[in-house]
Each structure stands twice: as C-alpha cells, then as structure tokens.
Image (cartoon, rainbow, N blue to C red):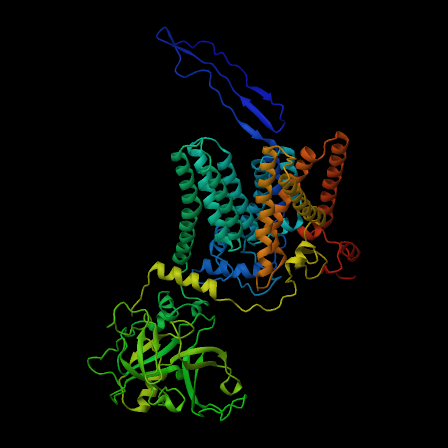
C-alpha cells in the first residue's frame, strides 16, 4: 500500500469581537489508497471547537490564588477551628456527636479534607492558638473551604450574567467578591461560611440557567437537578441556608405562576415544568437531606460525649457507653425489678428519678410550709440513690418471682426507693398510698408490657390523677441544686411527664443488706438493641431543634446593626511573640458601596413603582423585568439572610452576615449598569459615572491591599502601622509596643 500526500489545513484561530471568547477551529483532511481505490474512512474535515471565557478563567485563577496562597499559615488553631476541629476528630474516630448549630454535611465536608490529608483525629482541640503538630496536614484541613471560597468568585460572575447583565458588570461583581477581605479570611480557615456561600450561589446559578434556557433538552433539566442538589447542600451545611432556599422557592413559584397564565404554552408543557420544579426543588432536597443524616449515623456508630442528650434506646444502639451497661439486662419490667428511671424531657441535661436521706425544709423561702418528708428530685448523675424497686400494690414481695410477673399497661405499681425503703408518694393529705397506674404512652396495644429503654411511661397517682413530672426548675441549696420533681395534673404526654427505664435488673433478695449490695454492684449483664434509622433520624432532628447549649457572653459577639455599620471585627489569631495577626474585617470601601447600593435600589424601586402607578413607564418591559429580578434575587437575598438574625435570641458574630453581603456585592455592580443604561441619558453624565466607578474600583483595591496583612497574617506590621489601620474606634486591633 502506497500512501498519498496528506492535505493539512492549519488550525485557524479566530478572535471574536467579544474579547472574552476565543474560538479554536481545527480542519484536517486525510486519505489513503487501498487496493488502488481512494477511501475516506472518516467524515472530513474533522472539526473541534472550544469556547473559552478568558475573564471567567482569569477570575477563577485569581480566586484560587487569593484563597490558597500560603494556606497553611498560620500553623496554629485559629478561632472557630477549635470548635469544628472537635467534630472532625470525632468523625475520624467514628464517635457519635450532635451539633445544635446545624446539620452534619458541613462537618462531613471538613472531615473529608482531613481524611484525604491523613488526619487520624488524634489532636486535642482545647485552645485557640495551639500549634498543629508535624503529623497534621494543615493545608488539607483548610483546602476544601478555600476551594469553595475561590469558586464563589467565578460563580458570582456567572450569576450576574444569568440575571441579564453584561460581562463588564459581571466582572465588577466578581472583583468585589475577590477583593473582600472578610470573605478571603473566612475562606482560608477550616470554617463553613465559604462552603455555604458556594452552594447558595451554585443553586441560584443553576436555577437561573434552567429558567433562561429554551426548549426541553435534557441538559436544561440537569441544571434544575443541580439547583435542587445545591439547595439541599446549603441547608445541610448550616440551617441558615434555608433562608436562601426559601428565596429560590419563591422565585420558582412566581415563574410557575406566570407560566400557568401564559395561554400560548400548552397544558402538557405547563404540567411538566411545574412538576419538574416541584420534584427537583422540593422532593430531591428532602431526600438528600435525609441521605446526609443516613451517612452521618452510619459513620458515627460509637458512643461518645453527647450520648446523654439522646434517649436510652438511641444510646443502647451505639457501641460502648450505655450499651455496655444495658447489655443483657432483662427487657420486660416485672414486679420486684430494680430500675433507674430517666426523664424523657427534651432538656439538654438528662436526669434520673432520685431520692436520699434528706427531708424538705419545714418552710420554703416563700414562707409556705412543706410536708417535711424525704426529698424526691431528678439527679443529673449516675448514683446508687437513683435505684427504685417496682412493687405490686397488693403484695409485699420485693424480689422477682419465678417466672417473673411482667408489668403491663394500666397495672398499678408502687415505687420503693432501693436504699431508704421509702415509697414514692404525693406530699399532701389527700394523697393516700403511693400507688401509680402505669400509662405506656408509646404502646402499640393496651396489654403491652412495660419494656426497658423502649417504653415511655407516665406515672399517674391513683388517688389524685396527678402525674409525676419535672417542673423545669432547680431546687435551692438545701437540695444541692438538683432538679425539682412534682406531681401535677397535666394534659398530654409532654413537659417532662414521661419516664424511661434505663438500667434494669431482676431483684433476687428479700433482705435489705443483700439488696443494697445488689444495687451497688454494676448492672452489666449481652444484647445489642437496634432501633430503626427513622427513629434515630427523628430523634436527632428533635434534639437539634430543641436542645440548645448555654450561650455564654463572648468578647467578639455582635448585633446585626453593627455588621452593616462595620462597628465590629473579630481578632482570629495573634502570633504569640510578634504583631502578626489575622482579623475578620471587611473591605471598608466595598462594604460602604454595598450599603449605598442597597439604599439606592430601594429608592429607585419606590420611584419607579409610584410612577408606574401613575401610568408612566420609565423602563422598557425587558429592562423593568431585569430590574425586578435583580431586586428579588440580590435585595431579597440580603433581606432574608440578614433580617432573621435580628429576631434570633442567640449569640451572633460578624461572619453570620457574609451570605447577605455576597448578594449586595452582586447588586452593586448590577445597579451601576442600570444607572448607566437607563437613568443617565447624556454621554457626559455617563462618562462621569464611569470615571467615578473607576475611582471606586481603585479604592476597593487599595483598601484590600491596606488590610491584606490582617487578612493573610503576613507581613508583620509595626505598632504604628496597626494603629493606622484602626479606621473605627470600636475595632479591636492588637499590637505590641517594642
């Protein structure tokens, strides 16, 4: 076979008028001769085209440089890394925990970075400023938040384009995100705000691309799937992500409502569009949210420090901890059983029904008289005085018979304190004997047996119908601050009125000394009780929503109004011997521009609405729709991510404002284009506006550069230089005089 000459047309590179896009077109023609005949095995010419947005690529590279440069500096625990690091270590060791600040996805993402870096969890996160040992890859701990923070820059660029604005405007919005010192600081540490913002921007970008795309191509619905996935991820990182999620749902609802009213669209198409939005933005996020907890609970199967927040059944399903104590103990409570009764209340601190050889005072502090009988309290620690004997009201036996006589729902029992042999009773003259019918509130049938760990029981006093429950108060010093137990008539099964048998054994002796020896012996007897995923899931949800850790005062906590006015900062890290330090401080110029843009937008919106009410349309329909869209997304995003914090009764910090701030940066650039295109009509005025905008960008950069030593922790500044950066008297900038 003899080859023929090959005709090769060189690659033709054509530059479009839009400088951000380059087309690469490659043409090649080839042929060969087989058996004297010319054959063309391929369809020629072969064409390869690629569209590259050079601005987008440049912004992405700058974003990664600003967030990843010297990422391992400082080699010490910085501010809330001490908080999140504890959860990362627990993941590495598969130890169960619960965090009331949010779902577990954010912690799992941080743990993934640690796992990829070879972190084994053996580091004590006990103080800010502690040096990381050589075996800990600091870069890997911070890499994923930094990458997410870097991606926020090109994502902001793309979202601005999808809102209908030009490339110059999108570039301006991206530069505001790129040069915001607070966003950089929060991205460069093992924290979650950058991850949250990345998912929020991804959800809006994907949804807007879905909405603007025409037709029913599969790629269009892939954007909708990505939007729903990002929404689930945002909520899964922090519960505050639900604010942006609600805004996106509102946007989707408005679009559906408009589509329903469009008679030019077929009914089938309307149905498909509405159902697809419902499935991708409601059903899919819910399923992914549940999946997040499934993975979380599958990974964390060992007992840990947060077990006490959970029910005995939950604790018994974990390896170690309560499961070791309850291992092999009898399931069915019988007459003569020795039990500890844990309150099923939702308080953060668990407690067990308790009594001891001390009486109530003759008179309380209020002057009211008391029964002066033996105290009954709820004690927050394991103790021998937490043990009670379940006795039949009609028999004197204190040991379990052979075979055991199980206690069922409705049976009347008496509770005898194991160490003092005093009956539990209500302290008043009408109380009579201390008998309590057992009311199993979570029973499946009326003859159900009272079960260890599983059953939640109300103890209802037989003569007064009063229910044994926690009052929610702590007793004074005469009861050592233990929690108060009362007998009151209550409605329903809540309010601390149910009890669960946690530790349980069958009593074998009628002699008191032998019984005391039994009670003092550890109750270790080999069953691993399993509860379903759904039971665990619902319990974890309830605990996360109701169990709140005590919020103590913090030096750097602040109020939402202080975020807007930049009255506050947070000193994240200070070198132990030099002036090198890291602070959470925003770019003062870009934050000021953001506030002015928010005010200007609302003024302009009010003027437009009033004039349109009078029949005067200042904007074409397309421009008006774009103006409204940017208001809904950007101004609405700021509103929903900032105003709820005003209503929250919790400790707040400056970083809570960052998701709202991102929307304002997008609004600032969009409003500039709107004013240039639709408000100013004279070229001279437009040139002045562009000159002012150019000066503003320069000032933003100079402000970023001035505060960059406090952003990156280097170079070290002198005391005078640090003093010069204290632009607000309320800022807490630290320095050492030499």
Quadrant showing the C terminus: bottom right
Seen in the picture, residue 584 relative to 550 is either above or below; the reply is: above
The answer to which image quadrant residue 307 occupies is bottom left
Asked whether 160 or 297 is in front, the reply is: 160
Seen in the picture, residue 577 relative to 696 is either above or below; the reply is: below
Total number of numbered labels? 0
Task: Return the x and y of residue 242 as percentages of the image width and height.
Answer: 51, 52
Q: Is residue 635 left or right of residue 3?
A: right
Seen in the picture, residue 674 relative to 478 is either above or below; the reply is: above
Seen in the picture, residue 193 relative to 684 is either above or below; the reply is: below
Q: Is residue 520 left or right of residue 543?
A: left
- Say which residue appears at 40% left-offset and 41% top-offset: 275
Q: Residue furthest left?
A: 403
- Say which residue appears at 63% left-offset and 39% top-offset: 612
Asked whether 307 or 608 is in front, the reply is: 608
The answer to which image quadrant residue 170 occupies is top right
Task: Return the x and y of residue 679 as percentages of the image width and height.
Answer: 70, 35
Q: Is residue 612 left or right of residue 42?
A: right
Q: Residue furthest front?
A: 614
Asked whether 511 or 680 is in front, the reply is: 680
Asked whether 120 or 610 is in front, the reply is: 610
Task: Return the x and y of residue 201 as percentages of the image width and height.
Answer: 55, 44
Task: Return the x and y of residue 32 as percentages of the image width and height.
Answer: 41, 11
Q: Residue furthest top?
A: 36
The answer to which image quadrant residue 513 occupies is bottom left
Q: Is residue 114 visible?
A: no
């Amino acid at each position: 076979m003899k080859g023929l000459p090959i005709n090769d047309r060189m690659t033709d590179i054509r530059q479009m008028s839009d400088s951000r896009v380059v087309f690469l077109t490659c043409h090649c023609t080839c042929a060969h001769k087989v058996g004297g005949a010319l054959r063309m095995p391929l369809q020629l010419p072969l064409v390869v085209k690629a569209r590259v947005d050079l601005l987008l690529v440049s912004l992405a590279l700058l974003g990664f440089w600003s967030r990843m440069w010297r990422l391992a500096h400082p080699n010490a625990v910085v501010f809330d890394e001490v908080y999140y690091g504890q959860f990362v270590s627990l993941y590495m060791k598969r130890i169960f925990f619960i965090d009331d600040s949010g779902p577990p996805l954010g912690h799992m993402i941080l743990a993934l970075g640690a796992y990829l870096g070879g972190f084994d969890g053996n580091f004590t996160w006990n103080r800010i400023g502690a040096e990381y040992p050589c075996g800990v890859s600091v870069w890997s701990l911070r890499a994923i938040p930094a990458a997410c923070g870097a991606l926020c820059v090109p994502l902001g660029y793309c979202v601005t384009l999808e809102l209908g604005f030009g490339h110059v405007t999108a570039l301006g919005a991206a530069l505001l995100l790129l040069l915001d010192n607070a966003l950089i600081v929060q991205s460069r540490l093992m924290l979650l705000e950058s991850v949250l913002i990345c998912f929020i921007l991804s959800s809006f970008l994907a949804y807007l691309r879905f909405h603007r795309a025409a037709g029913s191509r599969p790629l269009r619905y892939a954007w909708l799937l990505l939007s729903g996935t990002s929404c689930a991820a945002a909520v899964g990182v922090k519960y505050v992500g639900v604010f942006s999620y609600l805004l996106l749902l509102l946007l989707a609802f408005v679009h559906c409502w408009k589509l329903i009213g469009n008679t030019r669209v077929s009914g089938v198409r309307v149905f498909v569009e509405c159902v697809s939005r419902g499935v991708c933005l409601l059903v899919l996020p819910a399923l992914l949210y549940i999946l997040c907890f499934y993975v979380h609970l599958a990974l964390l199967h060992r007992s840990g420090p947060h077990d006490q927040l959970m029910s005995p059944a939950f604790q018994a399903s974990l390896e170690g901890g309560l499961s070791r104590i309850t291992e092999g103990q009898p399931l069915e409570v019988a007459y003569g059983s020795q039990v500890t009764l844990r309150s099923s209340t939702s308080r953060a601190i668990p407690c067990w029904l308790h009594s001891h050889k001390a009486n109530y005072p003759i008179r309380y502090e209020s002057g009211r008289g008391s029964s002066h009988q033996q105290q009954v309290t709820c004690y927050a620690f394991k103790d021998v005085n937490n043990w009670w004997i379940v006795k039949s009201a009609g028999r004197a036996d204190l040991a379990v018979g052979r075979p055991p006589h199980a206690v069922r729902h409705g049976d009347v029992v008496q509770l005898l304190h194991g160490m003092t042999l005093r009956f539990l009773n209500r302290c008043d003259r009408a109380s009579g004997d201390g008998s309590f019918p057992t009311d199993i509130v979570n029973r499946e049938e009326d003859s159900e047996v009272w079960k260890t760990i599983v059953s939640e029981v109300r103890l209802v006093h037989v003569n007064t119908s009063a229910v044994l429950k926690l009052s929610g108060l702590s007793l004074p010093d005469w009861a050592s601050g233990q929690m108060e137990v009362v007998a009151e008539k209550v409605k329903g099964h809540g309010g601390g009125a149910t009890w669960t048998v946690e530790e349980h054994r069958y009593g074998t002796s009628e002699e008191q000394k032998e019984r005391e020896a039994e009670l003092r012996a550890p109750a270790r007897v080999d069953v691993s009780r399993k509860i379903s995923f759904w039971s665990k899931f619902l319990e974890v949800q309830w605990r996360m929503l109701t169990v709140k850790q005590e919020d103590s005062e913090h030096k750097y906590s602040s109020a939402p109004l202080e975020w807007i006015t930049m009255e506050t900062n947070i000193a994240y890290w200070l070198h132990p011997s030099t002036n090198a330090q890291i602070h959470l401080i925003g770019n003062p110029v870009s934050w000021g521009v953001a506030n002015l843009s928010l005010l200007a937008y609302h003024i302009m919106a009010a003027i437009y609405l009033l004039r349109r009410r009078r029949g005067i349309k200042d904007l074409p329909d397309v421009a008006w729709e774009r103006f409204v869209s940017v208001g809904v997304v950007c101004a609405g995003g700021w509103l929903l991510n900032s105003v709820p914090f005003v209503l929250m009764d919790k400790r707040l910090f400056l970083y809570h404002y960052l998701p709202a701030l991102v929307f304002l940066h997008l609004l600032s650039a969009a409003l500039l284009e709107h004013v240039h295109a639709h408000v100013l009509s004279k070229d001279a005025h437009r040139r002045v506006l562009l000159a002012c905008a150019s000066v503003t960008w320069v000032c933003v950069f100079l402000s970023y550069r001035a505060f960059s030593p406090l952003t990156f922790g280097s170079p070290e500044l002198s005391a005078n230089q640090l003093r010069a950066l204290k632009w607000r008297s309320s800022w807490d900038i630290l320095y050492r005089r030499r």
